[in-house]
Amino acid sequence: MEACGSAHFWARKLQKMGHTVTLMAPQFVKPYVKTNKNDAADAEAICEAVTRPTMRFVPIKNAEQQGILSIHRARQGFVKARTAQANQIRGLLMEYGITIPQGISNIRKKIPIILEDGENELPGVFRQLLHRLNNHLKELNDQVTELESQIQIWYRNNEASKKIACIPGIGPLTASALIASIGDAKCFKNGRQLAAWLGLVPRQHSSGSKTLLQGISKRVTLT
């Protein structure tokens, strides 16, 4: 099967029925689609791709793995929204000649002072808007904090993630994301294959005797 939306769910369902299920990344299947894309051509391409001896497969995730990864993705969305909201507040204030240093903590400290300052010539309608935007920023920050607490609880109850967190530079967020993304590391023949699957290797664009190594690709987004 192609590792597309809901593929892990259907893979688990088919496994319960006694089938042996393998998932392949869509970009590995696409080269085998000979003509226009349709269901029959896709099925033929999957059958052709799975027979390749060098084909790499996607580990099937269980429901718990998908659950913690969903929390990671939701947290990432809230973090992006929080950053966008902070930038909007900072940009709107710059139109009135008021600058706030970068950082969420600086906005939390400065906004109450700006709202109480009667000499900064901010109109009443803008003060109301600024108060509304600041409350929204607080709500987003609370959501991030709550989801991080849930991740911490899962991390403390998972022995594998605690072992990985012993590696310097890896904390609870990265450790929990790694365990949830990789699952059973025995799916990989060695550590080099795992690193390549994660994208922690240089991109290569070589031809003939000329070898060109590029930056780290970070192929898999953990969070």
Image (cartoon, helix red, strand yellow):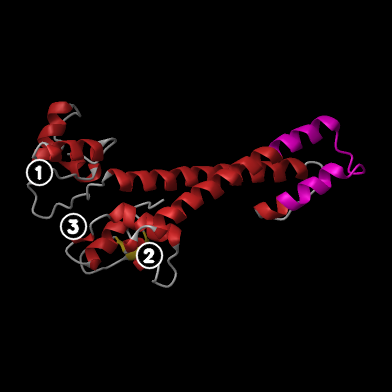
Q: What residue type is disc 3 on?
A: Cys
Q: Is 77 one of the magenta-colored residues?
A: no
User: Where 44 falls versus 21 (above or below)?
Assistant: above
Q: Is residue 7 left or right of residue 128?
A: left
Say whether residue 146 is left or right of residue 19.
Answer: right
- The residue that disc 2 covers is 162
| Residue 127 visible | yes
Of the numbered discs in the image, which one, if any, rests on residue 169? none
In this rendering, the label closer to the viewer, 2 or 3: 2
Q: Quarter-wise, where is residue 45 in the image?
A: top left
Is most of the magenta stretch helix, strand or loop? helix
The answer to whether mark 1 and mark 3 are in CB contact below 8 A is no
Return the x and y of residue 131 as percentages of the image width and height.
75, 37
The residues bearing labels 2 and 3 have C-alpha atoms spaced at a distance of 21 Å
Q: Position of residue 192 (x, y in %)?
A: 24, 67
Residue under label 3: 187
Under circle 1, the secondary element is: loop
The first of marks 1 and 2 along the sequence is 1
**Magenta-tinted stretch:** 108-133
Residue at numbered disc 1 = 20
Residue pictured at 39% horizontal, 71% vertical: 166
Q: CA distance from mark 1 to mark 2?
A: 31 Å
Report the Cα–Cα distance between label 1 and label 3: 14 Å
Of the numbered discs 1 and 3, the one sitting upstream in the chain is: 1
Residue at horizontal 69 percent and vertical 39 percent from the top: 135
Q: Residues within 10 Å of mark 2 (few under 14, many from 20)?
A: some
Q: Residues within 10 Å of mark 3 (few under 14, many from 20)?
A: some
Where residue 207 appears, as percent x and y from the top left, is 23, 62
Q: Residue at x 70, y 42 (%)?
A: 89
Q: Is residue 132 above or below residue 155?
A: above
Q: Looking at the image, tell me whether mark 2 or mark 3 is earlier in sequence order.
A: 2
| Circle 2: residue type | Lys
